[in-house]
Image (tube, helix red, strand yellow):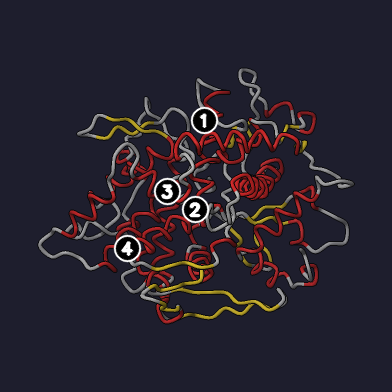
């Protein structure tokens, strides 16, 4: 619903677009264009009859990998990629616990948050040619897994720490020292092993340094991401007409301890990440003088007489990926329980979105594109993330993932807490998007739309 949104001031609407509910609400508005009597999308045709094929494809992947043991499906998070090929995180924790001065659980969790956050920021599209070879194991990994494995080795080697005597941390000073050349060396980038978006990826790390340093209320005086477990920020709003920002001292102090389980609302973590990481994103769309990050205008939503921000659609993909990834160590190590996670959406990126195109739920309106964007050899359009077709694609992906999850639950008579959206992302859609891409385009395994990545969106 879009109740009262049109009456907001630009500043209040900007604040709304940074909230979790705004993602699903604005994506739903794009989806509504495809419904009976709607004007439709500009760049895609929606084929709802094909959704059953996507659900069946996802169902067979879940059955292949997990049978009917839905409880065994892990949530979607960076932990999976960091353990690609073999366990790395649990052995690292065991190493810390057996050291001469073992850290307590809170410090262990801080270290994992440090690692997971910086690893997600490195996890933008690397292209189809780059690989990371894990020394000592002679195993090669590419794409998200390759970036994840590389980030573990960088972390263990103290790449992100200013104090080499304490390598297992990420801090502002350590990040500020990183150069493109150092990143290239650490990630084995060369003329024969090229990586897409290396400069943008390094820029994100340097911007993270500034964010950690400039936001001590979130990241502490020693400016490290792991301090989020003690400090958080949340945004409250009344009827979306007024947004009130208030600082919350300690996360534990604003949680409920029940039967030895600490329950924390997801909005505290989301608010901390949204505000705390604002300085790291490149200048893109702003509203009322407020930078919005991963928020883009959707031309299909533009209507005469509407406010400036009413056609803007938020995605906050990397923030969502970070949030999903940070929940897991806090729940596993600290035994916290996050509530309200159902307000989070699926991740609008090219694996999940590619699944919808490759299985026919969305088909390109080729005539809407400039012929120049199509490659003569592949017939795949190459466009920037700001292109309105990408905005439509990502919005339809968010709602499509909701619909897939709902259909899978109905098939197996499961509640949302028995098969969560995070589990569907992990066991079916992200993996499914990769598998169908490999079937359709075996030479590259790339997506059906080639996005000109700079390493800061996907």
Nearer the observer: mark 4 or 3; the answer is 3
Residue 67, compared with residue 437, is above or below; it is below
Element at badge 4?
Answer: helix
Disc 2 from disc 4: Cα separation: 19 Å
The extreme top residue here reads 377
Nearer the observer: mark 1 or 2; the answer is 1
Nearer the observer: mark 2 or 4; the answer is 4
Which callout, 2 or 4, points at the residue further toward the start of the chain?
A: 2
Whether residue 434 is visible, yes or no, is yes
Disc 1 from disc 3: Cα separation: 21 Å
Disc 4 from disc 3: Cα separation: 18 Å
Which callout, 4 or 3, points at the residue further toward the start of the chain?
A: 3
Residue 191, compared with residue 121, is above or below; it is above
> Looking at this view, is 296 or 24 the one in front?
24
- The disc placed on residue 435 is 1
Task: State the image coordinates of residue 351 (x, y, percent, origin top left).
Answer: 55, 38
Disc 1 from disc 4: Cα separation: 32 Å
- The disc placed on residue 321 is 2
- Which residue is under mark 3? 72
The extreme left residue here reads 100
């Amino acid at each position: 619903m879009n109740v009262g949104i049109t009456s907001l001031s630009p500043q209040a609407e900007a604040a709304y677009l940074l909230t979790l509910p705004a993602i699903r609400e604005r994506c739903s508005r794009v989806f509504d264009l495809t419904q009976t009597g709607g004007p439709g999308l500009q760049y895609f045709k929606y084929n709802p009859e094909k959704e059953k094929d996507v659900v069946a494809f996802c169902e067979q992947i879940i059955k292949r990998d997990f049978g009917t043991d839905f409880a065994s499906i892990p949530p979607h998070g960076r932990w999976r990629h960091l353990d690609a090929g073999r366990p790395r995180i649990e052995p690292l924790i065991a190493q810390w616990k057996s050291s001469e001065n073992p850290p307590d659980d809170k410090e262990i969790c801080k270290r994992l948050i440090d690692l997971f956050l910086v690893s997600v920021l490195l996890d933008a599209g690397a292209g189809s040619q780059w690989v990371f070879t894990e020394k000592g194991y002679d195993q090669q990994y590419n794409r998200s897994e390759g970036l994840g494995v590389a980030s573990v080795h960088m972390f263990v080697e103290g790449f992100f720490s200013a104090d080499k005597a304490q390598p297992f941390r990420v801090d502002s000073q350590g990040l500020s020292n990183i150069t493109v050349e150092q990143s290239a060396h650490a990630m084995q980038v060369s003329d024969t092993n090229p990586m897409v978006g290396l400069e943008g990826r390094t820029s994100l790390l340097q911007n993270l340094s500034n964010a950690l340093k400039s936001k001590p209320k979130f990241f502490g005086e020693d400016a490290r991401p792991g301090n989020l477990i003690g400090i958080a920020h949340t945004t409250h709003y009344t009827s979306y007409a007024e947004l009130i920002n208030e600082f919350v001292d300690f996360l534990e102090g604003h949680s409920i301890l029940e039967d030895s389980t600490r329950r924390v609302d997801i909005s505290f973590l989301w608010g901390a990440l949204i505000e705390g990481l604002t300085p790291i994103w490149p200048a893109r769309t702003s509203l009322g003088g407020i930078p919005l990050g991963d928020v883009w205008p959707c031309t299909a939503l533009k209507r005469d007489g509407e406010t400036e921000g009413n056609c803007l659609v938020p995605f906050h993909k990397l923030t969502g990926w970070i949030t999903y990834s940070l929940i897991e160590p806090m729940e596993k190590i600290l035994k916290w329980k996050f509530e309200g996670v159902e307000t989070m959406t699926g991740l609008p990126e090219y694996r999940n979105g590619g699944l919808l195109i490759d299985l026919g739920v969305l088909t390109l309106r080729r005539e809407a594109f400039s012929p120049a964007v199509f490659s003569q050899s592949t017939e795949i359009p190459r466009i920037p993330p700001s292109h309105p077709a990408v905005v439509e694609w990502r919005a339809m992906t968010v709602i499509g993932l909701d619909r897939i999850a709902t259909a899978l639950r109905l098939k197996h008579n499961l509640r949302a807490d028995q098969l969560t959206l995070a589990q569907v992302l992990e066991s079916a859609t992200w993996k499914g998007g990769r598998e169908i891409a490999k079937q359709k385009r075996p030479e590259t395994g790339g997506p059906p739309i080639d996005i000109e990545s700079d390493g800061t969106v996907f």
